[in-house]
Amino acid sequence: MKIKVIVTLKNGVLDPQGKAIQQTLNGMGFESVNEVRQGKYFDIEVNENDEVKAKSKVEDMCKKLLANLVIEDFKII
Amino acid sequence: MKSSVIIFPGSNCDRDMDVALKKFGFNNQMVWHNDAELPKSDLIVLPGGFSYGDYLRCGSIAGKSKIINSVIEYAKSGGLVLGICNGFQILTETGLLPGVLQQNKYLEFICKNVHVKINDTKNKYFKNIKKEILELHIAHNEGNYFCSSDELKLIEDNNQIAVTYCNKDGTCDINSNPNGALKNIAGIFNKNKNILGMMPHPERMIDKYLSGEDGSIFFENLLGNLN
């Protein structure tokens, strides 16, 4: 079963890359872009048929490795 | 005094650290990350570099390596653990030190000499040190120290801020902050001050003809405190 995870910086944590992307987009003429926050996306193939169990395992992975909870949040989708 | 330097795939300051420790009289040995046991040591060093290519987050993969469980056990029993640069990042990823090292504020890899002020001398690393301000080298892309405001209060209340970026006169302000680090933090201790993580590289400043000697002051003093 494939589980998808998105890791993003928490609100309020400085994201200089996002800021640089936003400014570049503004400079390219996309003036309506107010903010960009950059994150990470993971596709995780888990050898598990039960979706609840698979997501529970992935949640454990997120807490222990995929996200640094000091500055990042994660979303399992 | 016995020291051990852990080598991870991608470490690149491990040999410099070995040379520095031996120069000042440590009986040093190198330990591979895939070993399970630490040799008997008075000091463990996690060196600088790019362990595991900085994949995922700097220090995150090394923070789960086989030897790290022994390092955590050693640190929790009061052993001295020093993490330099990537070693500092590894220490925050393992949770042995609070906070995190984020990408530098201006998105640049910074490689230059800086001055740092020693903020606390009630510990084995800086007790009796003969200079309050050291000139050391930094070389990093992720040295921007960050932690929550609650965590910062705890760190400040316990005097865990070890060294801060300053100018040569000791002023810590935005102009002397190379990477955007919170409160100019260049290095911190754990609560018991047996674990020190810092971004500057003392092992690069041990030769008066090549670099400078403020790193020598650090190592001589540390050895003196341990003897």
Image: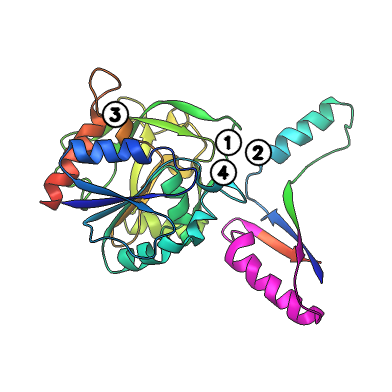
Q: Is residue B125 magenta?
A: no
Question: Label 1 marks which chain's residue?
Answer: B
Return the residue at label 3: B205
Is there CB contact under 8 Å for labels 4 and 3?
no
- SS state under label 2: helix
Q: Are marks 4 and 2 on the same chain?
A: no
Circles 1, 3 touching at the beta carbon (< 8 Å): no
Q: Have a look at marks 3 and 2 and say if they share a chain.
A: no
In this figure, which residue is indicated by the disc labeled 1? B105
The colour scheme of the drawn protein is rainbow
Q: Which stretch appears magenta?
A: A43-72
Rounded to the nearest angstrom, the CA distance separating label 2 from label 1 is 6 Å
* Tag 4 residue: B53
- The disc labelled 2 sits on which kind of residue? Pro
Which amino acid is tagged 3? Met
Q: Is residue B89 above or below residue A45?
A: above
The residue type indicated by label 1 comes to Lys
> Mark 2 vs mark 1: same chain?
no
According to the picture, the residue beneath numbered tag 2 turns out to be: A16
Measured Cα–Cα span from mark 1 to mark 3: 25 Å
**Label 3's element?**
loop
In the rendered view of the protein, which quadrant contains the C terminus of chain A?
bottom right
Question: Where, quadrant-wise, is the N terminus of chain A in this rendering?
Answer: bottom right
